[in-house]
Image: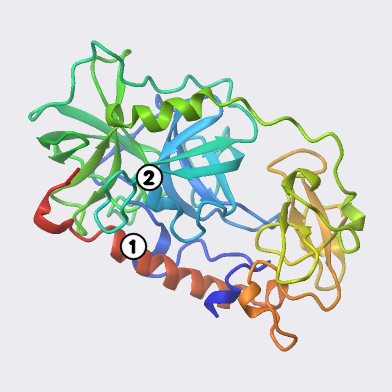
Amino acid sequence: MLACLPSCGPVDPEPPGPAGSLGQALVQGTDAPGDPAAVALVARRTRCGGEAPVLLCSGALIAPDVVLTAAHCLAVFTEDGPYEVFVGPTLLPEPGPGGRFVRVTRAVSHPKFVPATHIWDAALLRLAVPVTDVPPLRLPQAGDAPVAPGDLVRAVGYGDTKDAARPMGQRLQGLLQVTGVTDSGFQAGPAPAMTCVGDSGGPVLGGPAGNEVLLGLTISGDVACRTEAVQLRVDALEDFVRPFLEEAPPPAPTETLPLDALCEASCASDADCPSGLQCVSAGDDPARCLLPALQAGTYGAACTEDAACGEQGVCARLEVDGDDACRCFTPCEATVDPLTPEMDRPDVKCGCGSGPGDLGATLAVLLGLFWRQSHRRIPGGRFRA
């Protein structure tokens, strides 16, 4: 069942227990209308109409087309997984007015990241379209005062609030007090807020109002979200962040395969694929362009819901918005999901064959296991560089 996780079925937006997100909303936090550069990392949506976003983590916009987040946020879907970034104050239970999604084209984890201890727990995301109307967060510079014990810092994120009246998926802020500092990280306690499930990768800011600097990223904390938050120092990430910011954007593809010929035409790379589809191969079969979480197929008429695509039709989301963002999907005949090559057998089918209930339950299990792993107390109670 785990191998068949990629599917065209919608994902349950609120699985039982702590499995609703991967990261660590702020307990006792308040609304954060002045923090548009604090964003949410979500699994890429594949259906049009009725599909709630799946919150993975929070993140920090540090350039118009670059988001900094925690590396463990990529654990379930890996660096090559399908991701989007949400910009706006309200993601759940449904995206609020003024919010928008941007597709992620590339994700890179810190080369020295150690999942077991959260050492160098950082990742960079390249966006398909620059966010030009939101000022990026200011990175630490020479002359900025380093974080120190006793400092009050401000965390921002979309995670759990431990308040049934205020669900996760709202952008909130809260004050923490720094209790300890190392060369690459710092710890903080409640003052009175505390980070929690869904806040991982979110910004931790310090300095005077109007000139705050991105001091850290939330990466871990105590399971109860009451006493301890662990942050990675952003000033220790310069050698990781700077080269990524200075990379030249890849050239735009000059010609891509037609949407109605994807069952017959093979691809050599993602650049051959239209509308953000990925070039995926399985075994000795030719590589095909496909949408993450769907098997190979073709895309026809524009649509807004599954009912417009006939019996058992799927209205698939190719882009985040636009008149042609959603099109009716038709799977190639006798196709086994290329995203799961280990299941490449004639008697096994994934993709659209999985029902939404099964997929939601499977994802809940995966997220629950990840939550327990990423939110256990770090050995010794201290972040070690």
Give the number of the disc on residue 91: none
Query: What residue did someone put label 2 on?
Result: 70
Three-letter code, disc 1: Trp
Q: Residue 85 at what x, y percent from top left?
A: 54, 41
Tell me: 183 left or right of 325: left
Q: Quadrant of residue 275?
A: top right
What is the quadrant of the C terminus in the image? top left
Q: Residue 118 at what x, y percent from top left?
A: 27, 50
Tell me: 261 left or right of 253: right
Q: Earlier in the sequence, mark 2 or mark 1?
A: 2
Q: Callout 1: helix, strand or loop?
A: helix
The residue located at (53%, 66%) in the rendering is 12
- Of discs 2 and 1, which sits in the foreground? 2
Cβ–Cβ below 8 Å for labels 2 and 1? no
The residue located at (50%, 75%) in the rendering is 361
Q: Callout 2: helix, strand or loop?
A: loop
Above or below, comparing residue 211 to residue 362 in the picture: above
Above or below, comparing residue 286 to residue 26 in the picture: below
The residue located at (86%, 75%) in the rendering is 333
What is the quadrant of the N terminus in the image? bottom right
Three-letter code, disc 2: Ala
The residue located at (21%, 29%) in the rendering is 153
Query: What residue did someone put label 1 on?
Result: 371
Q: Quadrant of residue 97?
A: top right
Tell me: 247 left or right of 263: left
Res 167 visible:
no
Q: Residue 120 at what x, y percent from top left?
A: 30, 43
Q: Residue 133 at what x, y percent from top left?
A: 56, 20
Q: How many marks on residues? A: 2
Q: Residue furthest front?
A: 284
